[in-house]
Amino acid sequence: MGDWLKWALVTVVQFVIGKRFYVAAGRALRNGSTNMDVLVVVGTTACYVYSVYALLYGAISGFWSPTYFETSAMLITFVLLGEYLETLATGKTSDAIKKLVELTPGGGVIGQREIDALLIQPGDVLKVPGAKVPVDGVVTWGSNHVNKSMVTGESVLVLKEVNSVVIGGTINLHGSCHDPKSN
């Protein structure tokens, strides 16, 4: 394929299909940060500008340097393909998580809501997913690893399973548990 035709085709890919990268990169740079979009824009624009320069220089001087138009188009294509695949995977993961949540036993769960630790009453069952354990209690469901450094000063992970005592102020690191407040 001739370099002139490559230039025409890649111009469409670079500035029409790749416009979203330029817009996002401009926004990131205005905010004083860089991200993947800036990287894509810098890389593909460098390929494109060099190739245009090499093509025009060759047409004027007769000395033809290699052009890299296809590199610019392929970079944009691969990044967009990767984002598309990521979106598909994320959607499937969300569906799988929803199905897993539906499989959890309902038990006597009336409702779940986030409340202030001062409102916890004896007998309340608390779900503690990867957060600080708000009050002393006993694990009634699930298992987790708790960092007891707030209580003992020693950063040791301790496995807590059903009927294990948990202490308020410790940090639930891995897993989720239900913990009723002790009297």
Image (cartoon, rainbow, N blue to C red):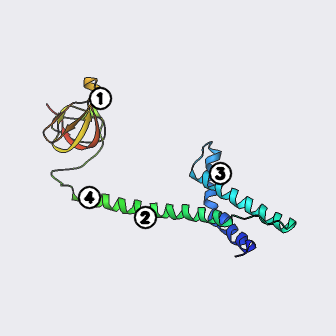
Of marks 4 and 2, which one's residue comes earlier in the chain? 2
Q: Quadrant of residue 68?
A: bottom right
How far across and down, in percent of the image, does residue 4 sit?
75, 72
Q: Disc 1 marks which residue?
A: 155
Q: Disc 2 marks which residue?
A: 88
Give the residue type at disc 4. Leu
Of marks 4 and 3, which one's residue comes earlier in the chain? 3
Residues under labels 3 and 2: Cα distance?
A: 27 Å
Q: Is residue 51 left or right of residue 122?
A: right
Which of the pair 85/177 is nearer the observer? 85
Give the residue type at disc 3. Gly
How far across and down, in percent of the image, does residue 125 sit?
19, 41
Q: Which mark is residue 46?
A: none
Q: Which numbered disc, 3 or 2, marks the residue closer to the eye?
A: 2
Q: Disc 4 marks which residue?
A: 100
Q: Which mark is residue 26?
A: 3
Residues under labels 4 and 2: Cα distance?
A: 19 Å
Residues under labels 1 and 4: Cα distance?
A: 32 Å
